[in-house]
Amino acid sequence: TMDTAEFMKRTALFSGLTDDELSSVLSTAKQRAFPAGTMIISEGHEGGRGFYVMLSGSAEVRKGEKTLAHFGPGDYFGEMALLLEDTPRTASVVAVEDVTALVITQWDLKALLANHPDVGLRMMGELAKRLRDTDQALKD
């Protein structure tokens, strides 16, 4: 099996990090399993300031009855709550198949972004794209 660091290097977000940088991110991250049907993040919920990187499985982003997006290995979510303090979750993320995800805390992510502005820029680009897609999905 491919180890987590190798996998992370292949994701768009972390591809620019050196092995040392990656291992420092991974040393603080927790790996968690979410069985199919589990609510990983629930809309309107304050707690659980985690940033999630999917290692395996698939998940859906839902707002009410609407499915806004699908996530698979290499995708990430939960960054809004980290970037905006005390923001309730804007949507729910539900495991469609069994999901294994890496959870990075707010503090660790902030440290990473402080040291690697390029990761932050990549995140912003992805966020902008998602906002546009979500906007489109809600209009349809």
Image: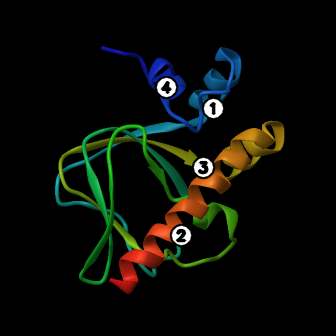
Is the residue under label 4 in contact with that under label 1 (CB below 8 Å)?
no
Query: In this figure, which residue is indicated by the disc labeled 1?
Result: 25
Q: Quadrant of the N terminus?
A: top left
Residue depth check, mark 1 versus mark 4: number of the one nearer the observer:
4
As drawn, 29 above or below 109: above
Amino acid carrying label 1: it is Val
Q: Is residue 88 left or right of residue 31?
A: right
Asked if residue 5 is positioned above or below residue 117 in the image, the reply reads above
In this orientation, which residue lies closer to the viewer: 137 or 67? Answer: 137
Label 3 sits on a secondary structure element that is: strand
Color theme of the render: rainbow
The numbered mark, 1 or 3, whose residue comes first in the sequence reads 1
Say which amino acid is labelled 3. Thr
Q: Amino acid at mark 4?
A: Arg
Along the viewing direction, whichever of 75 and 136 lies nearer the viewer: 136
Query: Residue shown at 24%/82% (left/top)?
Result: 65
Q: Secondary structure at mark 4?
A: helix
The C terminus - image quarter: bottom left
Q: Label 2, on which residue?
A: 131
Measure the alpha-carbon separation of dots 2 and 4.
24 Å
- Tell me where residue 56 sits by quadrant: top left
Between marks 3 and 4 in the image, the one whose residue lies nearer the viewer = 4
As drawn, 73 above or below 120 = above
Please report the residue visible at 41 percent of the width from the left and 17 percent of the height from the top: 3
Q: Residue at x 75, y 44 (%)?
A: 113
Pick whichever of labels 3 and 2 is earlier in the sequence.
3
Label 1 Cα neighbours within 10 Å, binned few <14 / some 14-19 / many ≥20: some
The residue where tag 3 is placed is 105
The percent coordinates of residue 139 (x first, y second) are 39, 85
Q: Which residue is mark 4?
A: 10
